[in-house]
Amino acid sequence: MAKRGEPNFRTRAVALVREIPVGRVMGYGQVSSALGVPGAARQVGYAMAALPPDTDVPWQRVIHSDGTLATKGDPVRVVVQRGLLQREGVEFFGDRIDMARFGWVPPPPER
């Protein structure tokens, strides 16, 4: 099993985020749990924050599991993230996204 600090974890996190469909979101902790490393939500956040500005990885689709955007760090990024999600059809109710409606759960891994 991968450990949080392994470079492979970041690569796998980015790969999973690439799979999140347009108009859907996942929580940071949901991404880490889906990768088999529960409790590594912060590392998922680090992986998303480390992406270059011109990335094609849909980083905007990773949010807090309560449906809010991560507002720490770069306040401009939050505005950009909200705009990108709204263009994908994700609706905000105040400052939250309805995870039951817009959340995505990846299919179980093939055996």
Image: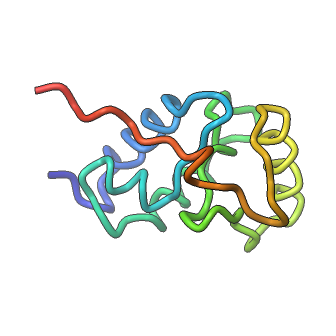
Residue furthest out toward the bottom? 72
Residue 90 position by quadrant:
top right
Relative to 34, is 111 above or below?
above
In front of the other: 110 or 89: 89
Give the quarter of the image for residue 37. bottom left
Q: Nearer the viewer, residue 106 or 57?
A: 106
Can you say which quadrant of the picture contains the C terminus?
Answer: top left
Residue at image location 76% in from the left, 70% down from the top: 71
Quarter of the image where one finds residue 43: bottom left
Residue 64 versus residue 89 in the image, above or below: below
Q: Residue furthest front?
A: 101
What residue sits 32% from the left and 48% below the top?
34
Q: Position of residue 105 (x, y in %)?
A: 42, 42
Asked whether 67 or 5 is in front, the reply is 67
65 displayed left or right of 84: left
Number of numbered discs on residues: 0
Identify the colour scheme used.
Answer: rainbow
Q: Is residue 9 left or right of residue 25?
A: left
Image spot of residue 21 (x, y percent): 57, 28
In percent of the image, x 43 and y 62: which residue is there?
Answer: 29
At 73% across and 74% down in the image, what residue appears?
Answer: 72
Front one among 37 and 65? 65
Residue 1 position within the rendered picture, expressed as x and y whole percent measured from the top left: 14, 52
What x and y, as percent, mark residue 93?
Answer: 80, 60
